[in-house]
Image (cartoon, grey):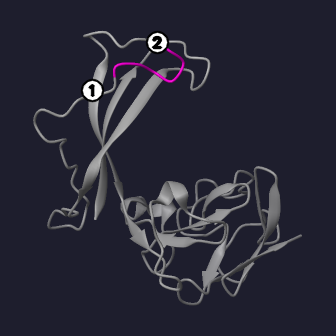
Amino acid sequence: MTKVYARRYSSGSNCVKNGYHDSQLFVGEFPTIKDPQGWRENIPVPEGTVFPTHCQCGYEFTGTDNKQSFNEEIYICKETGERMTLRAAKVGAIWRAWWYEDVEWLRGIDGKSYVCQTPGGEWNIDSRASNCTKPNDLVHKCWCRHGEAPNFTVNKNGNTCSAGAGSIAIGNYHGFLINGELTNC
């Protein structure tokens, strides 16, 4: 299922909350539609849907401000059955980010791309480290992912660079992913 929102925003504007005026109204949940390659297709808001008239800061949208159908796919936690969007993913959640898999440096050696929600934010396990010592080498992995989802261990055992020791530092979090569990350094 996919949550659909009617969204209004004003790019190039100056809102104190987001930097630009933005507001969404929940329209409903609809069956997820995927194309033949498995990509989620955007579900348009039903005709006649009312869009937001104001930003949370009080700005009144004009006729030239953008209207958009904003979609969020609903995922189900295998352990608890809880339904959530990725925006609501809890710390420790791990998901396959198939939309990154066509970018070589964003996928693991198995061709898949996984993201982990850390206390400091989302970490694409199969991406590049900010301190990568081989930025032009598309074959190596800054973090080497082992095991099956969600019980991954990430370390430096594999074709890697000399950046770090396999830990992740993101936002205010610094730690390791071992057997699917985040641990602090």
Name above or below for residue 4 compared with residue 105: above
Q: Quadrant of the C terminus?
A: bottom right
Relative depth, front residue between 133 and 79: 79
Amino acid type assigned to the residue bearing label 1 in the image: Lys
Return the x and y of residue 59 as percentages of the image width and height.
Answer: 46, 12
Label number found at residue 115: none
Separation of marks 1 and 2 at Cα, in angstroms: 15 Å
Q: Which residues are magenta?
A: 53-58
Return the x and y of residue 24 as percentages of the image width and height.
Answer: 38, 35
In the picture of the structure, the residue carrying the numbered disc 2 is 59
- The part of the image, by quadrant, that contains residue 29 is bottom left
Return the x and y of residue 18 as percentages of the image width and height.
Answer: 57, 26
- Work out whether mark 1 precedes mark 2 in sequence or the reverse, and give the earlier one: 2
Q: Residue at x 56, y 73 (%)?
A: 94
Instruction: Provide the secondary structure element on which disc 1 rests.
Output: strand
Relative depth, front residue between 183 and 3: 3
Amino acid type assigned to the residue bearing label 2 in the image: Tyr
The answer to whether the residue labelled 1 contacts the one labelled 2, judged by CB atoms less than 8 Å apart, is: no
Magenta span: predominant SS is loop
Horizontal relation, residue 82 to residue 155: left or right: left
- The part of the image, by quadrant, that contains residue 141 is bottom right
Instruction: Provide the secondary structure element on which disc 2 rests.
Output: loop
In the picture of the structure, the residue carrying the numbered disc 1 is 67
Return the x and y of residue 52 as percentages of the image width and height.
Answer: 33, 26
Q: Nearer the viewer, mark 1 or mark 2?
A: 2
